[in-house]
Amino acid sequence: MIYKGTKRGLLGAILIAVIVSFFSAHFNRYYQGVAIDVAINIVLAVSLNLINGYTGQFSLGHAGFMAVGGYIAAKLTLVFGATCAPWAQPLVFFAALVAGGLVAAMAGLAVGVPSLRLRGDYLAIVTLGFGEIIRVVFQNSETFGAATGLFGIPKWTTLAWSFGAAAITVYVVTCLVNSTYGRGFLAVHDDEIAAGAMGVNPTRYKVTAFVIGAFFAGVAGGLYAHLKTTLVPTGFDFMKSIDIVVMVILGGMGNTLGVILAAIILTLLPEVLRVVADYRMIIYALLIIALMLLRPQGLFSVRRKKGASK
Amino acid sequence: MSVELLKLDQVTIRFGGLTAVSALDLCIGEQELVGLIGPNGAGKTTAFNMITGVYQPTEGRITFAGNCTKGLRPYHLARAGIARTFQNIRLFASMSVFDNVRTAMQVHRQHGILDALLRGNNFRKGEKEVELRVMQLLEIFGLENVREENAKSLPYGDQRRLEIVRALATNPKLLLLDEPAAGMNPTEKVELMKLIRFVKEKFALAVLLVEHDMKVVMGICERIAVLDYGLKIAEGTPEEIRANPKVIAAYLGQETGGDL
């Protein structure tokens, strides 16, 4: 009864995205770009929320996973996309996005298994280091264009692709968490020892969260690459990870709806405040400090309301 | 004694130079209610942590239902049928009462990650079953009206009760209670004793109780083992324990003021 309608909601969301996208020629290109940015950030923030929010594993490596997905997908379409027939383009794009996601997921597994014995700050440092390693690897790899990056990537990311991906991400995370299986993520977040005593394998849940989160970060990277048409390693630095973390914190850890709203706001805010764009990181820092002092549960958090008085 | 369920055979654990538990022998039969007592720092909770797989014994072996538990992690043992509560309540703070119990149903869940995503009939049937079982448990313990409350917002006694319910949701053969009476007032303690007896009968399981409160231990345990400085100094019925001079010495100090 609680689970009814979720699948229909997903299909509906994708359908709307496709229909809107169909008329996209009539829209202002600038607004369209911003809207796609919003969708990509939703994918990033909601997937990071599975790791940071629901499972409570503080990861600072999301930009790294995004880079993996972006580079892999871009390379694939650069190699296969140019020669394929126009009708096959969506298929190539889809395959490239999934491949990027899968390689990113493998990277998530590779980081997750050894580092998930670590807790809190230590895990944050390791994932931070990992993200930087990824960036440096791409920066020095001739195949991926080294420091100049990849360019001439086909501009295939449309409203339908990006919002479709966002809808699927939200669907997957919501469905996972709202199941008996998924309560394990929250259990690991709340109390690892108690979770273990109740038959939940904490390591397995943590790795699963990392792999799924990394997959969607990779897909977001692919979408990003085919929106901007160029990829430079510096686009995936530590600051990008922080951007996504801020969305999760602002939205409220473990609150998908809040995180979506935060992703929308934090994507639109720099656009609206173009004048003060240079001070964005300062504003972010102040925002986090203010938030931690005034509303540590996040701007939109409702989930923990009842327990607030513990 | 009935069929042997848990057996500790010369179990020793050392932390660096400190021997926390030394050559402990303990046997718990099916559906038996055994108490483990001892002064502060005697090694009771350490013994608990070895039984549940949090610590691995340095020497000796633990067998549960005939299988050696060496190398098994807590979640393995939870699935094998050992459930526990904690000395300082460890409920899942961000979840409702219902979800706390639901999480412990992991052990019996028939559907996994893919089912959760595809939400097919299998999944819905499985979730329905889980929900039904959780509600049954909550009703047995009179917690059905607070099912949507946050677990940590319950009164203290109810939190203790919920922890027991959550442990029962794993459908254990052996329930370990770590100082369940801690912080309870006399009325709550009487309730607790009733509850433990009830749980043992209703769910047909063995209970190992670590407790400081003598009234509770003496009142319900069929057999009691006493630890002092990591050594088992006595074992027997409540009457025997009460009369045992070693136990009295451990708790009250020796009357003669000898070379303790």
Image (spheres, coloured by chain):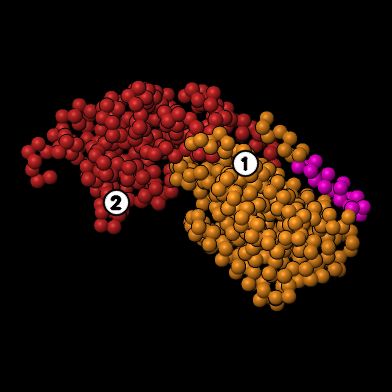
Q: Residue furthest right?
A: A26
Label 2 chain ID: B
Q: Which residue is mark 1?
A: A301
Specify the amino acid type for callout 2.
Ile
Q: CA distance from mark 2 to mark 1?
A: 45 Å
* Magenta-drawn segment: A10-27
Specify the amino acid type for callout 1.
Ser
Q: Is residue B82 visible?
A: yes
Out of B215 and B113, give the one closest to the viewer.
B215
A116 vs B183: above or below: below
Name which residue lies at 61% across and 45% down. Answer: A298
Q: Is residue A18 magenta?
A: yes
Magenta stretch: dominant secondary structure: helix
Q: Colour of chain B?
A: red
Q: Is residue B113 visible?
A: no
Q: Which mark is residue A105?
A: none
Which x, y percent locates residue B61?
32, 48
Which x, y percent locates residue A203?
51, 52
On screen, residue A301 versus residue A114, left or right, reads right
On screen, residue A209 versus residue A98, left or right, reads left
Disc 1, SS: loop
**Which chain is depicted orange?**
A
Q: Which residue is mark 2?
A: B13
